[in-house]
Amino acid sequence: MNYKTDKKAAIFMADGCEEIEALTVVDILYRAGIPLTKVSISDSLSVTSSHEVTFLTDTTVSLLDFDEYDMLILPGGMPGTIHLDACQRLTEQVTAFAKAGKQIAAICAAPSVFARLGLLQGKKATCNPSKEGALKEGGAILTYEQVTVTDNIITSQAMGTAIPFALAIVAHYLGQETADALRENIIYKPQ
Amino acid sequence: MNYKTDKKAAIFMADGCEEIEALTVVDILYRAGIPLTKVSISDSLSVTSSHEVTFLTDTTVSLLDFDEYDMLILPGGMPGTIHLDACQRLTEQVTAFAKAGKQIAAICAAPSVFARLGLLQGKKATCNPSKEGALKEGGAILTYEQVTVTDNIITSQAMGTAIPFALAIVAHYLGQETADALRENIIYKPQ
């Protein structure tokens, strides 16, 4: 791989995660040349998604050296999001990243994990309609946008917004022009 | 699973296939309740995509009873599409399906397989810009649309059109209203 940045991102996969939300980030960051590690939150490298797709990750959360990373990314899906929320090693690091001004990103149901951790208090964010109550309880200012970037936090709505979510991550690392060129290359555009 | 149709579709995965083009179909058809079998074209159930995602299929092409199926679906990606094109058992069945008026569908580079087999002669179709020459050589009438449905053939352009491609398959089985409701549910809409 010819990487375009020396910063590294990690995406966390649990059984019951939404495979397209997770793997669109993998696909787009690979195309962009941004280093990304796929991390299983169990002790197995194998994860089975909410639609019964079994795929392999690169490592497990217990083995991950979080200090090597610049961004932590959470896909949604059920019950995947519940498993992410219950993974203490992950949620401690998500909180530490947020407080240190490092990047965190979540899509669909997963922004509710940030809300539960108190990381969205007074901040603009978006999420799946099913989790709007949880975000409000956590003090977030809902934007109802497909993707919202606020300070060091990226949030997004659903499986159908996975591409703009991944492109917002590309824009963070490599700029909006690079993200726009990639968007054109994959022929993602309004219908 | 509570299936909404007794028709069955099969999607064919090769090493080097585009994972989002392949798995978006899996995701959306699962949500819609349309039976879909993931088929490896090698003798291994394990496939590694063009962006190094390894995932499992349900069966292999040598074991598949094509008579049970109503639709054959080809994802793009390189070199995945080359491998699909070289799989004689698959291309013979694609030709037989097309001639019998059964459904065939392909996205990105994969419509070039249909063109090479002579199945797009005089028919409207779309594909990745990199394969427009191959489609013209095969006598296709290029539409440059995100998705084109002509008789029993569905074609689509790229990774960024995987959702409308999958929704066109849903519309074929369950009608446009069901596809539109699913599109809203996953929050896929013009930006």
Image (cartoon, coloured by chain):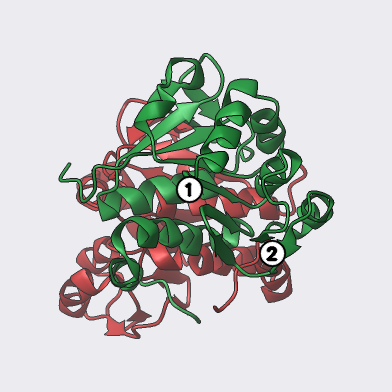
Chain colours: A red, B green
**Can residue B144 be seen in the rendering of this structure?**
yes
Query: Dot 1 falls on which chain?
Result: A
Amino acid carrying mark 1 in the image: Leu
How packed mark 1 is, by other alpha carbons closer than 10 Å (few <14, some 14-19, many 20 or more), is many
Q: Chain of mark 2?
A: A
Residue A93 visible? The answer is no
* Whether residue B69 is situated above or below residue B40 in the rendered picture: below
- Left or right side of A117 for B122: right
Q: Nearer the viewer, residue A124 or B112?
A: B112
B177 up-or-down from A56: above or below: below
> Is B169 situated left or right of B160 in this image?
left
Q: For mark 1, give the secondary structure.
A: helix
- Where residue B182 sits, quadrant-wise, is bottom left
Q: Position of residue A56 (x, y in %)?
A: 44, 30
Residue nearest the observer in this picture, A38 or A97: A38
Give the residue drawn at x 32%, y 26%.
A43
Q: Are marks 1 and 2 in contact (CB under 8 Å)?
A: no
The picture places residue B87, in percent across and down from the top left corner, at 64, 24
> In which quadrant of the rendered view does residue B125 lie?
bottom right
At numbered mark 2, what does the secondary structure look like: helix, strand or loop? Answer: helix
Q: Amino acid at mark 2?
A: Leu
Discs 1, 2: same chain = yes
Q: Which residue is at 84% across, 50% downward?
A: B137
The residue labelled by disc 2 is A182
Residue named by callout 1? A23
Residue A122 placement: quadrant: bottom left
Whether residue A166 is situated above or below residue A152 in the rendered picture: above
